[in-house]
């Protein structure tokens, strides 16, 4: 028995000694590799730095030349369009246009198109500047131009409605018409017959419709649905509420790094934009005869929405809202609501967070107007009453009480409460794609923000092509979608197609030279996106406007869960991936979530031939701030291990690590990559950050 135990002890000692020798050998190998890496570290870093610097300088030079060329072409074109950076030219342009009496529909819409393009240029200048005076100047110019464009739309609307009686539809006895160009769709209905059985109308050719109650069907009114492809109201909301920041060099978001916060902090913005629930508790009722219920309520809500207050100020405003609500309830609903306790009423203000949600498909202006006086014909004369008031909004609801969605839900069984709801139906614009059922938000003109309360009976078709809902009043509305519906990414791949050509797959972005093109397997992808080459900035804007968002910003991490990665290591990885994207295929690895915040893991291999990347050729690489290495594990291994692959070395840069396993042809292809191609790939990688969001 003792002999057996001695034998086992001897064997165990031999195993321990063998393991000790192996560890010692491994440590020696690691020391040699680290020493070798340290010896060439400076040269490798210098070479990488030189490659990046040369590429950056070439891109900067090309962009400067293109900007100068565009400036010269604009100068020689000389079409009378003002320089958006010169305030005097903008002011002169607006003054002349405002005073112009032209109301011809075609002419006015052409002028509006020019103004819309000018607003886009001013918006671009606003994003680029950090000067406070310039920011204020561009804000003011944008706001004034937006108001002027809407004024011109109202003048066109009024001119058409004045001639309503001359364009009566023989079947309905009313006037209905549609005016459309590339930027707007104008649907007008004039109630000439005032038939109490009329319930609504569908403008079949443009997929818009409305429903009105009997009290409007017998009124002298006109209904307008104006759909603008652009969204000036969200721009106004962002200018009014979001913080301003100064631009800097390209950040990982593909935009600009925020270096200075002005006026409002991020926490304050988050608090301000979050959905606000304002409970109405039982208070001593205060007579508010001097202020109507509707106006008092709107004023108090405005003060709550448009500034960030202390706790005492908020409590004061809640009481003001209680007084306004109680006052209107006393006057209009005392008999109907005597059995309800006011503590059961909950008034909810739901403000849309424009950092989390994106309005898509433009804005729908839903309005009701007094029908302008119609011409009368007598003895060969045309007699028309001329009013100085212009286009007048028809007040609705007429009793001064607008019921919010929460209050409606509690009182919908009470007959005769307030004014009936008005309905509207919309066909989803073909140039946008909703990944889930769209949500609806209405415009709060007082607070200059979108709100989701006050919208009821929302119904969306199964194929998400149509949506219908009801509101308590006529207001502009917009369809919204979660900005980060595509996040986190399930996978990504950057694969070369040849010299200066690669395909970056998240949602199918195809890259070629300094331009990009969207390809997708989704049949409902908007046709204006696919098959069209554009630069990376234009691609991002076009995709986001269409509802296909795979791009990040400074707020993305607040709404999307990540494992957290060192941003400098991540940015360095994108720079080096772009340098070798003509010859190497890169794709995601599940181990990237297991390697810790200080490291990155991806699968890479050289890929020069056309066709799919063979999975058995992909190898795992571990990237850190100090060095890169090839891992000994594979994607199918059971556990993660940071040990390097036997027979490989350490390198201070990722590209030198890759070169150890590349052919001479592959290395030569990377050195021949065009600087604009490299810059485009890097821009898209930085704009999507796949190593963090996949």
Image (spheres, rainbow, N blue to C red):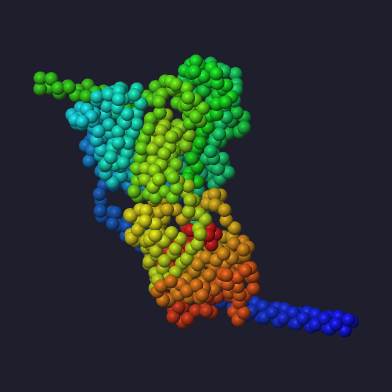
Q: Residue at x 27, y 27 (%)?
A: 191
In the rendered image, the quadrant that contains the N terminus is bottom right
Q: Is residue 168 above or below residue 327?
A: below
In the picture, measured across the screen, residue 346 lies left or right of residue 194, that is right
Residue 525 location (% of width, % of height): 37, 54
Q: Is residue 535 above or below residue 607?
A: above
Residue 544 location (% of width, % of height): 42, 52
Q: Residue at x 51, y 27 (%)?
A: 410
Q: Residue at x 78, y 79 (%)?
A: 16
Q: Is residue 568 above or below residue 87?
A: below
Residue 447 location (% of width, % of height): 47, 34
Viewer can see residue 319 = no
Q: Is residue 89 above or below residue 403?
A: below
Numbered marks: total: 0
Residue 342 location (% of width, % of height): 56, 22
Front in this rendered view, residue 505 or 499: 505
Instruction: Say which quarter of the image contains residue 166.
Output: top left
Instruction: Say which quarter of the image contains residue 230.
Output: top left
Q: Residue at x 40, y 45 (%)?
A: 462
In the picture, measured across the screen, residue 241 lies left or right of residue 70, that is right
Instruction: Say which quarter of the image contains residue 529.
Output: bottom left
Q: Residue furthest left?
A: 380
Q: Residue furthest right?
A: 2
Viewer can see residue 220 = yes
């Amino acid at each position: 028995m003792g002999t057996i135990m001695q034998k086992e002890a001897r064997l165990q000692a031999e195993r321990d000694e063998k393991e000790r020798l192996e560890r010692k050998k491994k440590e020696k190998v690691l020391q040699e590799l680290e020493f070798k890496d340290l010896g060439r570290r400076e040269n490798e870093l210098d070479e990488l730095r030189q490659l990046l610097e040369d590429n950056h300088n070439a891109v900067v030079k090309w962009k400067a030349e293109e900007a100068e060329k565009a400036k010269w072409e604009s100068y020689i074109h000389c079409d009378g369009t003002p320089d958006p950076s010169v305030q005097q030219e903008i002011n002169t342009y607006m003054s002349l246009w405002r005073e112009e009496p032209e109301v011809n529909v075609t002419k006015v819409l052409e002028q509006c198109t020019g103004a819309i393009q000018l607003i886009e240029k001013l918006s671009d200048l606003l994003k680029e500047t950090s000067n406070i005076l310039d920011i204020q100047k561009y804000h003011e110019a944008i706001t004034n131009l937006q108001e002027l464009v809407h004024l011109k739309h109202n003048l066109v609307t009024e001119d058409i409605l004045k001639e309503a009686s001359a364009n009566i539809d023989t079947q309905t006895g009313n006037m209905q018409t549609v005016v459309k160009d590339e930027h707007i769709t104008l649907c007008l209905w004039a109630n000439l017959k005032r038939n109490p059985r009329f319930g609504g109308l569908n403008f079949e050719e443009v997929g818009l419709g409305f429903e009105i109650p009997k009290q409007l069907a017998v009124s002298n009114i006109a209904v307008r649905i104006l759909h603008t492809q652009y969204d000036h109201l969200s721009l106004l909301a962002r200018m009014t509420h979001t913080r301003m920041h100064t631009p800097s060099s390209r950040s990982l978001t593909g935009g600009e790094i925020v270096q200075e916060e002005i006026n409002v902090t991020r926490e304050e913005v988050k608090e301000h934009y979050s959905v606000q629930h304002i409970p109405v508790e039982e208070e001593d009722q205060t007579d508010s005869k001097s202020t109507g219920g509707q106006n008092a309520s709107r004023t108090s809500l405005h003060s709550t929405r448009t500034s960030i207050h202390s706790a005492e100020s908020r409590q004061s405003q809640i009481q003001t809202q209680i007084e306004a609500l109680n006052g209107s309830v006393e006057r209009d609903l005392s008999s109907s609501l005597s059995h309800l306790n006011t503590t059961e009423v909950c008034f909810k203000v739901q403000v849309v967070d424009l950092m989390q949600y994106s309005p898509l498909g433009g804005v729908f202006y839903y309005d009701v107007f007094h029908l302008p006086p119609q011409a009368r014909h007598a003895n060969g004369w045309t007699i028309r009453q001329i009013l100085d008031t212009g286009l007048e909004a028809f007040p609705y609801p007429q009793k001064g009480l607008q019921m919010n969605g929460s209050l409606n839900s509690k009182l919908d069984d009470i007959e005769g409460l307030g004014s009936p709801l008005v309905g509207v139906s919309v066909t989803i614009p073909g140039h946008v794609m909703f990944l889930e059922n769209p949500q609806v938000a209405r415009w709060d003109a007082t607070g200059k923000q979108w709100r989701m309360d006050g919208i009821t009976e929302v119904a969306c078709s199964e194929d998400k092509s149509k949506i219908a809902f009801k509101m308590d009043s006529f207001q502009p509305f917009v369809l919204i979608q979660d900005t980060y519906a595509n996040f986190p990414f399930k996978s990504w791949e950057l694969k070369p197609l040849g010299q200066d050509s690669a395909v970056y797959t998240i949602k199918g972005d195809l890259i070629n030279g300094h331009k990009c093109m969207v390809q997708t397997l989704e049949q409902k992808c908007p046709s204006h996106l696919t098959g069209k080459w554009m630069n990376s900035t234009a691609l991002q804007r076009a995709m986001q406007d269409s509802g296909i968002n795979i791009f990040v910003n400074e707020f993305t991490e607040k709404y999307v869960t990540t494992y957290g990665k060192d941003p400098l290591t991540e940015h360095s990885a994108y720079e080096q991936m772009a340098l070798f994207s003509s010859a190497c295929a890169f794709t995601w690895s599940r181990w990237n979530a297991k390697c810790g915040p200080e490291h990155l893991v991806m699968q890479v291999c050289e890929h020069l031939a056309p066709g799919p990347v063979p999975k058995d050729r992909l190898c795992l690489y571990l990237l850190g701030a100090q060095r890169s290495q090839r891992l000994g594990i594979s994607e199918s291994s059971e556990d993660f291990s940071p040990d390097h692959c036997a027979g490989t070395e350490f390198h201070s840069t990722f590209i030198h690590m890759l070169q150890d396993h590349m052919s001479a042809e592959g290395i030569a292809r990377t050195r021949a990559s065009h600087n604009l191609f490299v810059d485009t790939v890097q821009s898209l990688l930085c704009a999507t950050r796949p190593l963090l969001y996949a």
